Amino acid sequence: MLNYVMKKKQILIFILSVLILVIFNKVFLTTFTRTNAFFANQALVNSEEISPQRLFDKTWRIISKEYYEPTLNHQNWLRWKYRYQDKIKTDEDARVAIDTMIASLNEPYTRFMPKKDYEELTTSITSKIYGIGVNIYSNAGKIEIFNVMPSTPADFAQLKQGDIITAIDGKDTNGMNVSEVAALVRGPENSVVELTIMRDGKKLTKTLKRKEIKIKSVKSSILDNHIGYIQILSFMSGSTPNEFVEALENTKNTDALILDLRGNTGGLLDNAVFIADIFIKSGTIVDIIYRDGYKKSIKAQDEMIPLDKPIVVLVNGASASASEILSGALKDYHRATLVGRKTFGKGLVQKVVPLPNRTGVNITIARYLTPKGTDINELGIKPDVEIGNDFDILIDSKHDIQLEKAKDILNGKTRIRSAKN
């Protein structure tokens, strides 16, 4: 059924996860990578150790050469090199100098990532998280388990929803935030962590061995017995294309399809292109405009007939970047009806460059246009049917008016198709 697919190129309350999902939204809004191949063809982490001064100088050169706007915000870029020449002695000096230099660009997506931030980014790309498999949140200042993922170390250790984590390896969690607790629970695969928990007023100690926890970026189900529903949580994971193909297989016996991109703040360009290619027969999916004005048109592959079902795409104000690549292409080709609220409006492309000292820099290297040549940066994409608000899916999932509207539209389209047949 899906062989043709494999032939193609391939927020009111957040439940903050021990598996670093706590930082995903920050990363997604600031990372829209040029191509998965970039990561496939070079090491994610540069372990070379150099002096803080050399790290600054290297970052200066990379931005000077690759930043998408050639005037670098109408300034003499050399002034930053002269300003900090022979003045950077520590890692903190380098971070402050690089951040100050980047701030002069007056553009929100180019940023320097110190070691910790860069580790979090590479983890989200590779989807390799080593932990115990619980989602946690802060409840009245206490770190509480919201749920336990099945077939994980936490599940096997019989941790339960509502357990309060009071200590990790003997370190009291009192006063810690979710991110700090998550950092203590994570660790190398097969290493051991000891959790002290409170359950029904009783203190318990659990010893667990950390394992790789698979992060799913795509979920699917069947609604009303005939409508496929696929939610893409992010485009960041390298496994997103395979997960999407699996979701299509799970919903293959349906008459129509809902793609839910609400809250999906973006990720890898290739992932958005791969999915758009499944539904678009031919033509440009996205145009990338580089610093020198060179335009690279990424086109649909026409080896096989695309998947032909009525589609509704759900979007909102947190649908950004790669979400807008996909929804913009489907809208321009009239391949889908967009329902919800106007999207975020991020029309810039970033490239992640590993730097020595296990750091990295996220550089805006281009802008992009939808197939009709529309620049959506800071404007967003207006849906065909505007309904609800940006938080409907979070406030009350049982009364999701945007989803209900999508089903109404698709029920009408499938009735028309049936009458024609």
Image (cartoon, helix red, strand yellow):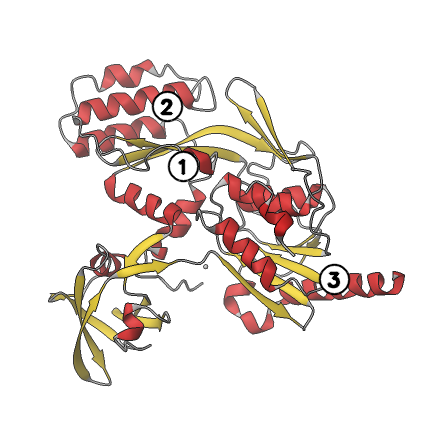
Q: Can residue 381 be seen by looking at this rendering? A: no
Horizontal side of residue 419 vs 137, given as left or right: right
Question: Under tag 1, what secondary structure?
Answer: helix
Circle nearer the N terminus (2, 3) = 2
Residue beneath label 3, please? 409
| Mark sitting on residue 259 | none
Disc 3 residue type?
A: Ile
Question: Label 2: how many residues lie within 10 Å, few (<14), some (14-19) or many (20+)?
Answer: many
Give the answer, above or below, for where 283 lies relative to 29: above
Question: Under tag 3, what secondary structure?
Answer: helix
Question: Under tag 2, what secondary structure?
Answer: helix
The image shows residue 204 at horizontal and vertical percentages of 17, 79
Identified at 44% across, 22% down, the residue is 73
Horizontal side of residue 142 vs 77, given as left or right: left
The image shows residue 326 at horizontal and vertical percentages of 60, 45
Disc 1 residue type?
A: Ala
Disc 2 residue type?
A: Ile
In the rendered image, which quarter is residue 332 located in?
top right
| Mark sitting on residue 40 | 1
Horizontal side of residue 236 vs 361, given as left or right: right
Q: Are marks 1 and 3 in contact (CB under 8 Å)?
A: no
Residue beneath label 2, please? 63
Identified at 66% across, 67% down, the residue is 404
Circle nearer the N terminus (2, 1) = 1
Give the answer, above or below, for where 292 lies relative to 192: above
Nearest the eye: 45 or 344: 45
Horizontal side of residue 382 vs 361, given as left or right: right
The image shows residue 187 at horizontal and vertical percentages of 22, 56
Nearest the eye: 242 or 187: 242
